[in-house]
Amino acid sequence: MERTAPGAFGLHVRSVISVLVIVAAWEAAARLQLAPPLFLPPFSTVVLQLWDSTRDGTLPMDLAISLGRAFGGLFIATLIGVLAGIAMARNQLVNWLLDPFVALGFPSPKIAFLPVFIVWFGIYSLSKILLVAFACIFPIIIGTFSAARGINRSLIWSGYSMGASRLVMLSRIILPACCPRIFSAMRVALPVALITTFTAEMVAGGGGMGATLMYSQRFFESPVVFAYIVVMLAIGLLLDTAMVRIQRYIPATRT
Amino acid sequence: MTSKIEIQNVAKSYPTDSGSVLALAAANLSIKEGEFVSIVGPSGCGKSTLLYIVGGFLSADGDVLVDGRAITGPGTDRGIVFQEYALFPWLTVRQNIMFGLEQRSLSAQERKEITERLIGIIGLKGFEDRYPRELSGGMKQRVAIARTMACDPAILLLDEPFGALDSQTRELMQDELLRLWLDMRKTVLMVTHDVEEAVYLSNRICVMSARPGKIVEEFDIDLDRSIPREELMLSEPFNQLRNRVWLSVRQQAINAAEQHAG
Amino acid sequence: MPAKLPFRLMNWLWQMVPLLIFVVLWHLLSNSGLIDKAFLPEPREVFAALVDLLRGPQVVENLAITLFRSFTGLLLGAVAGVWIGLLMARSEVFRAYVTPIVGGTYSLPKSALIPLFILWFGIGSVTAICAVFLACLLPMIVNTYHGVNTTPKVLVWSAEAMGYSQRQMLTRIFLPHALPDIMTGLRIALGFSFVLAISSEMIASTNGIGKLIFMYGENGAYSYMFAAIACIVVAAFISDRIMLWLTHIWLIWHESAVSTETA
């Protein structure tokens, strides 16, 4: 009735097999013209396109623009969100003031506000960075809030009895105690940042991966469409792996 | 007389990072029908493991025969009661007990009757529609026992059934269990760390050694259980038996400690 | 025991006061001359636009279309996700080969697939529902898997000793035990369903509230734009509340019975 778990190596082997199977099926289906080349360009063609786009600089530039926007927004969201979350957890007035907005904002699709940001801040990077910040701030506030609320009381009381000032309390006790949960919230917010950036670019243009993606779709350049999707997938994977690695090597971020 | 349960050379080892660990050395035990056998021993000696093997939940080397036939897995002939109650939290008291009845070929009417009767026996009338989270530990354990009884198994396997209860509740539950057993005379195999409990309830006690567990001593308990608990537990025969068993278990515990230190 | 109704009502109203403060500040800001009135219409104008919208068919029809797309994708994604998660937890072979696929798609922003779907299915509901379906699939799979995987051994063994087969246990033991996790996943998926439906509509569609908002923005009808956004925000909020309420009802047996508050 018991099960033996496959080793880590076994899992890797299986992952590689799955990926190879998918790629092989893709190539075969495309070559056999099971679907028109417009709908499903062969894998090899997509790889070639990837190479071309990298060589002529469009892909790296688009990537840099998009990532810049995503991280910019995430950074702002973290800065404001963490402070707001802690303030809400420690101060009743702030909590009362901000709670309805967080409650309304959290379930709402922030992308619906994109036209507002475009009207106010234009179609280039500023509007997108701010929209990303708007979208990411809610999970970060909520994560920080619950972390700050959940801090072991004895930690706080020890701080007070040692005569810690407000600032010291914040920086030496509260923030470090909340760090793991804040990091988890950021791990959740990162995909949100990427999605929001790409979607905003797809809707409004103004450069970046999403804009090029839409442009290629409009002109039926399927290899580019596929290539860019693959890159987005890879970026997402890479960044999440990076966050996991960080968690492993920086104990402060571990729960 | 053929035995109800025959445990032959049962051994169990677990694979670990540093090779395999022998949890249970060759265990041999014969249990006759209607007997109440307790297994006692130091923590980690493998007594629960043996119970799970008899229940068919764990694989092992050796054979376990019930009514002369080797078991192949869990079965409705061997009901089990766990220390953690293992009630289904999404079902009410009544539904939990009914759960045990569903696999039996009975009519809906019969199922209802049996359920109501069992609820009455365990004294939980009025709590039929409560969820486990609303019940105290003692009540939960009573439901667990009733649910197992609902399947009408020939054999009852009890894994430290009262370990999670406070001592007053534990004593009450022991009396109830004794009453049930005297009434229904099922074959019972119980694992417990409470020596007094074992002496109070069983008619045979097996003492297990430290890991790898082996049954090293057996005691036949022949007490007059018709006398009230207060008299019984203060009586000379009870105390003599208790002391002997306790010493035996203690010796095994000391051996275990020496093993670790050495 | 619910507190007396007037008290709860008073409490609820008190919690809405910051919103009123916000509206007042908004009004002052609009009229202050710091910002061009065109970019920040007064609350009064937005309110008038809202009333106008609600009286006509615009919002109701488009909102209905968006909700249809969201909930259809959500339902399909939830059903598929629960079954996949369940199978992954109970079958080693299935898990071994599906995990890399699931893990891989986790990192893909699902809205990136919208242009691909437009290529395949054109603009319209199929594209939107596909995008929503894929986005909802993942949280449902992950949460169901976790819920099933953490089923205590003693529950499984008890059921086995009562004569239940592995197949019966799927729906009688594993699924009920996973229900709290499934509801958590469902709440997350609900949020995704709105985002993907609206994203799809904004990127390319002829209808839906996302398209409506975008259109008002393009045409400079900013009060209507804000009004339409307010509608979807409220719709999403109400849906989330309903989800929390359903969770409360269906998990009444759960030890940490969920309270009807945020997160």
Image (spheres, coloured by chain):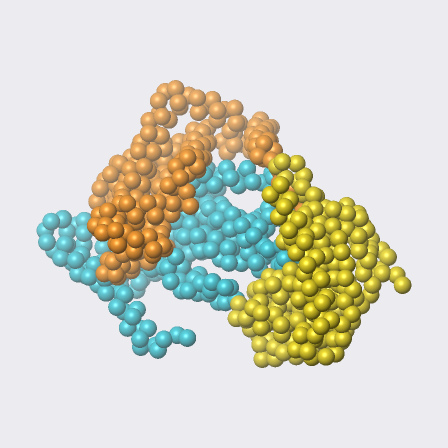
Chain colours: A orange, B yellow, C cyan
How many numbered callouts? 0
Q: Residue furthest left?
A: C33
Give the percent coordinates (x, y) of residue A186. Answer: 36, 43
From what the image shows, is residue C178 above or below residue A116? below
Q: Which quadrant: the N terminus of chain B?
A: bottom right
Q: Residue furthest top?
A: A55
Give the percent coordinates (x, y) of residue B217. Answer: 76, 56
- Between residue C123 and residue B192, name the one nearer to us: B192
Q: Is residue B214 at least partly visible in the picture?
A: yes
* Image quarter of residue C159: bottom right
From what the image shows, is residue A234 above or below residue C163? above
Please give the name of the residue rendered at 38% of the width and 47% of the height, measured from the top-left corner. A181
From what the image shows, is residue B145 above or below residue C100? below
Q: Is residue B191 at least partly visible in the picture?
A: no
Please give the name of the residue rendered at 52% of the width and 71% of the height, measured from the top-left corner. B134
Q: Which quadrant: the C terminus of chain B?
A: top right
Q: Residue furthest right?
A: B1
- Between residue B208 and residue C174, name the one nearer to us: B208
Give the percent coordinates (x, y) of residue C252. Answer: 50, 67
* Image quarter of residue A248: top left
- Between residue B73 and residue B53, name the one nearer to us: B53
**Left or right of A131: which side holds C259?**
right
Give the percent coordinates (x, y) of residue A191. Answer: 40, 41
Please give the name of the residue rendered at 16% of the width and 58% of the height, measured from the top-left corner. C25
* Image quarter of residue B162: bottom right
Please give the name of the residue rendered at 14% of the width and 49% of the height, measured from the top-left corner. C35
